[in-house]
Amino acid sequence: MRIAIIGAGVLGVASAYYLSREGHEVLVLDRQPAPARETSFANASLLTPNHSFSWAAPGAPWRLLTSLWQRDSGLRLKPHMNRQLLDWGLRFLRNCTAGRHRANTQAKARLCFYSMGETGRVTRETGIEWQRNTQGVLYLFRDRHELEENDRSLALLREVGASIAPISWDEVVAIEPGLGHAGSKFVGALHGKSDEVGDARRFTEALAEVCKTQGVTFRLSTTIDGLDMNGDRIAALRTASGPIKADAFVLAAGSYSPQLARQAGLHLPIYPIKGYSITAPVGDPERAPRTGGLDEGTLVAFARLGERVRMTSVAEVGGYDTAHGPENFAKILATGRELFRDGIALDRAEYWACLRPATPDGPPYIGPTPVRNLWLNTGHGYLGWTMGCGSARLLADQMMGRTAELDTSLYRYGRY
């Protein structure tokens, strides 16, 4: 079977890897000149099944509302309105009940834990290097009430295999010596023992090279102008260089998936959630972070990637704008200086903003659609890196007609 995959991020490339191993002729298309040049380029670099909560939660509407006048909120609603946001927002609100939050969080967590196993397996099979660190991830709390609430919420994740527990400050410092001076700033910490750190872009680029050895073709710098339909099937993708035909098509275009799905007559409720990141060289090695963590008070994450440090923050509901200015990184820089002093050379930071494709309930869309030869692997929100290999495995199992190891109805198109 000839399969065309739209998108060369971690989801698209992982899908190509699994499907090419099944013996199919696979073509990957992307408008960018290289793999992993959008959401996968400079993300948080944390693989966090132990922190896979759904954003749609009972308190989320109030947090979004208050973000309109709290400029430094980690979860932000930037005033704007369009039909896509209105539809997504109403669906999001319907999922902000305790019952739906529980079901959606556990669906995400099951996929995350499954995917961690697949990521490890792909790494062993291919020998690719992506600055992987398996020492776990720290979650640092400045407010005792938030710590207690978070620990109670973790019961949802522990039911499906979470390995996360409170640790003392001495244990924090043993993991991250650079935080030795910061004990007075925090009231407690959790350690996600099975969480990991690693560079999604390096993983995706390296896996793309492996895919090429398996016969996968990459057509980059290629924009899809439209779809040619033949009844309930896609006949071809329209591009400037001519039509691209295939037996099956996989939509893994992240935040831009809804526009292409619409041309096939499908409504795909995904909305872009903007995030900001910096990547800076290590400064003083004794004070620099050694693994990864999240400051729950400022909602700034950090991750050590070889001789670099990645820091990220903000979930901004603001449309498709990827522009950024110095004010967008002020909290990240302030948190970096507060936690690690001169351990990070923040004066040499590189700046980035990307769009994370979020579904209104939380779980992604993986599997078939009413268009008989169109399959989905999209909508992973802030956990696309964590869910990448597991999602590709679920997709391949469904396309091959095999019974998957997870309940695929949790991730189906049109699930509500």
Image (cartoon, grey):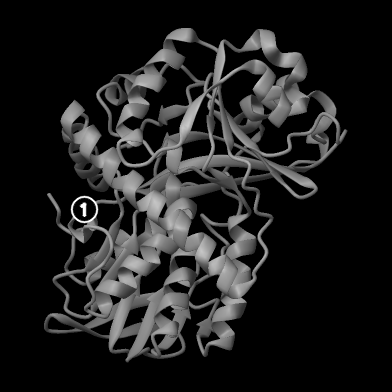
Taking depth in this image into account, of 122 and 220 the one nearest to the observer is: 122
Q: Is residue 13 left or right of residue 367?
A: right
Residue at left offset 35%, top offset 20%? 152
**With respect to residue 313, does 48 lie above or below?**
below
- Residue 185 seen anywhere in this rendered image of the structure: yes
Residue that label 1 marks: 410
Residue 335, x across and y down, in percent: 67, 23
Residue 159, x across and y down, in percent: 30, 36
Taking depth in this image into account, of 380 and 400 the one nearest to the observer is: 400
Question: Toward which corner of the image does residue 280 lie, by quadrant?
Answer: top right
Question: Toward which corner of the image does residue 353 lie, by quadrant?
Answer: top right
Residue type, label 1: Leu
Q: Is residue 323 left or right of residue 392?
A: right
Q: Is residue 236 left or right of residue 175?
A: left
> Where is the N terminus found, in terms of image quarters?
bottom left
Circle 1 Cα neighbour tier, 10 Å, few/some/many (<14 / 14–19 / ≥20):
some
**With respect to residue 183, does 112 lie above or below?**
below
- Residue 67 seen anywhere in this rendered image of the structure: no
Residue at left offset 63%, top offset 54%? 199
Secondary structure at badge 1 equals helix
Residue 147, x across and y down, in percent: 46, 16
